Amino acid sequence: MANISNKELKFPKEHSVLVTGGAGFIGSNLCEYLVQNGNKVVCLDNFATGKIKNISHLREKENFRLLEGDIRNLEDCLGACENVDYILHQAALGSVPRSIKDPITSNEVNVNGFLNMLVAARDSKVKRFVYAASSSTYGDSKGLPKIEDVIGKPLSPYAITKYVNELYADIFSKTYGMETIGLRYFNVFGRKQDPNGAYAAVIPKFVMQLMKHQSPNINGDGTYSRDFTYIDNVIQANIKALATKNNQAVNNVYNIAYGERTSLNDLVLLLKKYLSKYEPKIKDIPTTYGPLREGDVPHSLASIKKAKDLLDYQPTYNLDMGLKEAISWYWENLK
């Protein structure tokens, strides 16, 4: 469960919310928070990457409804938007390497699916459309920290799709008067994040390898750095984006991160440190290194000033705190 108090966020429970991709890592955590808050929640997922186990405990709740459907199908989107006040659009096909291997499917889901959801939200007169954007939009921009208005050229098909989402959201707000808010996530991690598969995120993948006494394999020399962001910070950002009454906050895009960067070498050291508290010999597992991944951004660090100023975003979990909670969850659920 999210360690965020309802008083802190103050999102009225009478509002109904559609969470697309609601069986995925971030989506299922959002569903859980909203159900706990008393909101009526509709979860739309096609289970391409989402897992039924992420939401199985919610299915008995009166205020939760699961719809199996695909955002590439406009009828599914329109059906999911019926009698819904707000949308948290998390459905996407993630991963830079996956998009390089199969750009067509990434585009179909992330661009065509996104446009379908915008049209469905418009036609259903949804009050606000909050969507998952991505730090990959910064592309080859060299400046640090990343500031929302300064981006470079995308470095992967995935990054292109997420930038196109922002352009479409902007046009729909200007053309149709829709309220949209984009949240550029920076390397989100935490409970329910899948450690398996070719496109697993780095933290759960490394945790799983270390738990199996396998060497974590870093792409490159380990000096690349990321602004790792714990899931509860992301939940807070989404709920505040739904709840804000600040007119200046709407029709904007925000960095959602903690605002600190950590090298992959330092990340592995921290993982070994915290995992060795459960099993001491993990700290002695060696790290291996491989070639850099195509499309990888060398360094990622967010300025979160805009989100703090306009959304009152106040991330409460730094990397250390988040890793301790995430590792505890993985140890209990995956060992």
Image (spheres, rainbow, N blue to C red):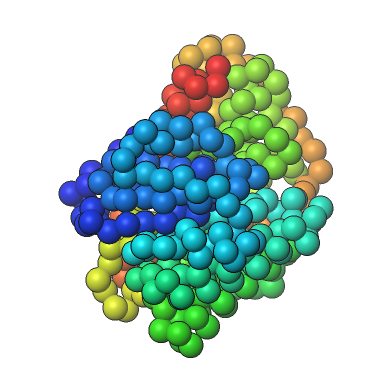
User: Which residue is drawn at the image coordinates 31% and 40% (left, top)?
Assistant: 62
Is 149 left or right of 234, judged from the image as shown?
Answer: right
Q: Nearer the viewer, residue 315 or 270?
A: 315
Residue 318's spot in the image, x, y percent? 40, 43
Q: Nearer the viewer, residue 4 or 131?
A: 131
Whether residue 179 is situated above or below residue 238 in the rendered picture: below
User: Which residue is drawn at the image coordinates 58% and 28% (left, top)?
Assistant: 207
The answer to whether residue 262 is visible is no
The answer to whether residue 164 is visible is yes
Which residue is farthest bottom? Answer: 175
User: Which residue is drawn at the image coordinates 35% and 71% (left, top)?
Assistant: 127
User: Which residue is drawn at the image coordinates 53% and 62% (left, top)?
Assistant: 77
Q: Is the C terminus in the top left, top right, bottom left or bottom right quadrant?
A: top right
Q: Nearer the viewer, residue 10 or 202?
A: 10
Whether residue 142 is situated above or below residue 294 in the rendered picture: below
Whether residue 240 is situated above or below residue 269 in the rendered picture: below
Residue 293's spot in the image, x, y percent? 77, 49
Residue 10's spot in the image, x, y percent? 21, 55
Is 266 left or right of 31, judged from the image as shown?
Answer: right
Specify the quadrant of the image occupied by residue 166. bottom right
Q: Nearer the viewer, residue 62 or 162?
A: 62
Specify the quadrant of the image occupied by residue 91. bottom right
Residue 1's spot in the image, x, y percent? 35, 35
